[in-house]
Amino acid sequence: MEQENRGKRKKKKPVKPEPAAEEVQPAADRRPRGKLRWRWLFNTLGATLVVVATAVTAFSLAMYSYYTSTILATLESKAQTAAGMFRNYTETTYLYTARQFVNQFEEKNYIEVQILSAGGRVLMSSMMDISGAGVETPDVPKSIESKRVEAYTGPDPNTGDHIIAASAPVVYNGTVVGVVRMVTSLRQVENQMFRIIAITSGLGLVILIVMGVTASYFIKSVLDPVIRVTETAKRIATGSYGVQMESRSNDEMGDLVDAINDMSMKIDQAERTQSEFISSVSHELRTPLTAISGWAETLYNGEVRDAADVKKGMGIIVSEAQRLTRMVEELLEFSRMETGRFNLSVEPIDILAELEDAVYTYREFFRRKNLELDYTECDEDLPIISGDPERLRQVFCNLLDNADKHGGSGGRIEVSVGREEDDVVIRIRDHGPGVPEDELPYIKYKFYKGSSKARGSGIGLAVCDEIINSHNGTLDIGNAPGGGCVVTIRLPIGVENV
């Protein structure tokens, strides 16, 4: 009842058919309703910012380390050279020579040279007169104690400037008689580092802007097709089955569009097929019910008294009731297939005996309709195969019934069985009009009836195909040479195949 009501609703409000190549309105002028675009852009720019900031920081630290290590190496070399030169003089002449060295030092504008006593007091300096002052940085006492060049990098305790200092001891006869200390400020280095950081930060900002523009274009190229697909999916969900989108690329997005188009067409076809199935089944049920109801009322009211007419009426009731039973069984079988409750009772069977039972059952029925049934028996004994005898007999009867419905106008139906390699092959052929070539690929689809006007639910062949496939066999339908349709069943030999 629910399906009939659904069919009625569709007649009241039919879905307007969509053109096969209809294109969904471009989404270029529409803004995305969600936040995916901004979240994607934020994540992209955030990741780029982290990379750029890390690169700028690492480059700045590397440059700073390079500058300071170069300056420190230079100061250590100059201090050690000067201290070594002073060792060649006596303790008395050392200070005189040191004063000449301080006064004549060529780089005094950049580097301060200090001559210290063995106690760490400043004796002379190239920058200013700070004689007698003490040096509070740790490089001087370390150098005096270790008799090696020692360095210091950090703030000057007196001025607060960031400095680099290198102290080298002057050793005379194994005794430290003084210290040569080279000092320079890192102010210029820091100014240079500020310029480097500014330049690299500007470059990083340019990279960030370029990445933002590029990411925006890329996101737009990805999200706009997604928006088109979303809009189309919404239209399909509201009942616009068959709507199509234009595929504008050959990448994964193009594959998605093709899949959506294919899904839309299949849903449209399934909807039409289901509607046709409901209409067909309703008609198929109504016809025998009308005959049964009509004859039953006639017999009940006593309107027919002739024994022959009564027998004829009872025969019609029985025949139509049997047709209803077969139809209901097909529907139940199909329901089991759809819900996964389709099972086989497998046992060793004589396939030749099962086929002959179906042939003998239909031979008398065909004879009464002046329809000839030719059965070609197998010349050799067929081996026992494994299968469900009831299901296979159901397939044979269904195919013979179809041959009568669709090809009975040819006046003859042929059935043959034989062995081909490791298969038992059964062929059922009629001499009717055959099947249109464009309908052959779909003839085994559920609910599909094609252009045939014969009565039926359209699920018989789908059930037969499922039964044969469950036996690891194949069921093929084609047009026979000379006219008519031929159905070929192949079943594997051997119990292990099922």
Image (cartoon, rainbow, N blue to C red):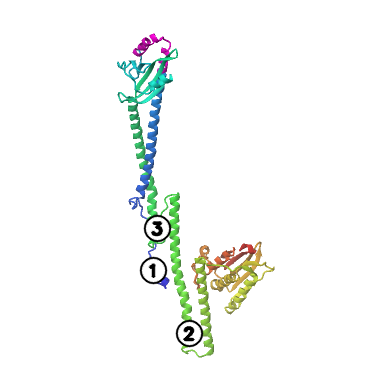
Q: Is residue 89 magenta?
A: yes
Residue range of the region highlighted in magenta in the rendering: 79-103
Corner quadrant of residue 110: top left
Corner quadrant of residue 411: bottom right
Q: Is residue 203 magenta?
A: no
Quadrant position of the C terminus in the picture: bottom right
| Residue 100 seen in the figure | yes
Locate residue 173, reporting x and y percent.
44, 12
Please, what is the three-letter code of the amino acid marked with disc 2? Answer: Ala
Residue topped by disc 1: 10
Mark pair 3, 1: CA separation:
21 Å
Q: Is residue 97 above or below residue 58?
A: above
Say if mark 3 contacts mark 1, CB within 8 Å.
no
Locate residue 72, reporting x and y percent.
40, 23
* Crowdedness near tag 2: few (<14), some (14–19) or many (≥20) residues, C-alpha within 10 Å: some
Please, what is the three-letter code of the amino acid marked with disc 3? Answer: Ala
Locate residue 73, reporting x and y percent.
41, 22
Residue topped by disc 3: 233
Give whichever of discs 1 and 2 has the lower sequence position. 1
Residue topped by disc 2: 296
Q: Is residue 180 above or below residue 259?
A: above
Give whichever of discs 2 and 3 has the lower sequence position. 3
Locate residue 406, reporting x and y percent.
54, 71
Q: Residue furthest right?
A: 380
Please, what is the three-letter code of the amino acid marked with disc 1? Answer: Lys
Say if mark 2 contacts mark 3, CB within 8 Å.
no
Secondary element at image label 2: helix
* Crowdedness near tag 1: few (<14), some (14–19) or many (≥20) residues, C-alpha within 10 Å: few
| Residue 74 seen in the figure | no
* Crowdedness near tag 3: few (<14), some (14–19) or many (≥20) residues, C-alpha within 10 Å: some
Secondary element at image label 1: helix
Q: From the viewer's perspective, tell me whether residue 102 is left or right of residue 432.
A: left
